[in-house]
Amino acid sequence: MYDFVPTVSDPDGDSLSFSIVNQPNWANFDPSDGRVYGVPQATDAGLFPGIAISVSDGLEQSSFAAFDIEVIEGLTNRPPEIGGDPPTEVMVGKSYSFTPTADDSDGDDLTFSIENKPGWASFNSPDGTLSGTPMEVDVGMTSSVAISVSDTQEQASLPPFDIEVQSEGSAVGSATLTWTPPTERVDGTPLTNIAGYGIAYGRTSGIYDQVLEINNPGISTYMVENLNQGTWFFAVYVYDDLGLTSDYSDEASKEIADSTGSPPGKGKK
């Protein structure tokens, strides 16, 4: 990718327009700011001499020194990179959303693609966002969902992952969290305007894809219901009436047994 924008100024504040001579056939030119940009192909290898950009205020014109651009054949394109930890579970009627991170060392434009997209979800190819709200009819597993990113020459992919849509009726347990309301901020000043608490939780330690906000500053215990079988991880945070939010508390966890197992216990914070 080639990209150049000249720097100009006009003491009178006049509107400026740009022009170019010997514009490379693989490059684009923007007359509003003088930008020259484009992606040459292997067939464009060679020297493009005497490129001259001029700027005019309608009365007078100034020109940059002419320059050459050499397109070198055989430069190695660096593949893009993609990352992220997609949630693998979603409850019926709840919103699911995942956007991968992506980067290209060459600055190439990127597009995303997907394989085995769930039928209840939509996919945004410009940024790779997978989102949707499954219904009861969608309960079940979609396997080997694969999101990839491409710079038109090379591609990188996330490891395939599964997404399970769970019915509210399949929940078998709950966890009760308790905590001590804080009285100080991190700088030692009194905390007197608590507005509420948040409980963040999920199926992977340190990754919380579900959040409950409790708009009651006087509460210090809460039962999280509709938890499916397996291990759940929890953290609590506090927010004030200005919208400032604390860090997460230490993490608590709880194993939810199946419906034939022992009654659920308590996770405390």
Image: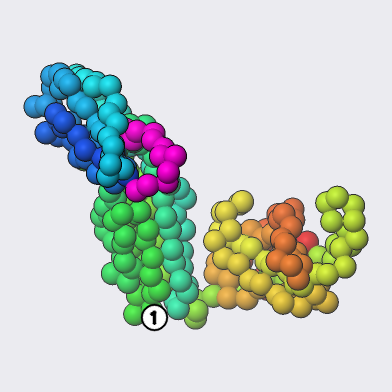
Please identify the quadrant where the C terminus is shown. bottom right
Our reading of the magenta stretch's main secondary structure is loop
Q: Which residues are magenta?
A: 1-15
Q: Residue at x 87, y 68 (%)?
A: 192
Please name whichever residue, 217 or 137, is drawn nearer the observer in this view of the structure.
Answer: 217
Q: Residue furthest front?
A: 59
Within 10 angstroms of label 1, few (less than 14), some, or many (20 or more) residues? some
Q: Residue at x 31, y 60 (%)?
A: 124
Q: Residue at x 49, y 81 (%)?
A: 169
Can you identify the residue that label 1 sits on?
Answer: 136
Q: Residue 71: x and y, percent?
A: 19, 22
Q: Residue at x 43, y 58 (%)?
A: 98
- Say whether residue 189 is magenta: no
Under circle 1, the secondary element is: helix
Please identify the quadrant where the N terminus is shown. top left
| Quadrant in which residue 7 is drawn | top left
239 w.r.t. 150: above or below: below
Left or right of residue 41, residue 224 in this image: right
| Quadrant in which residue 128 is drawn | bottom left
Query: How many numbered discs?
Result: 1
| Quadrant in which residue 240 is drawn | bottom right
Amino acid, disc 1? Glu
Q: Residue furthest left?
A: 43
Residue 37 shows in the view: no
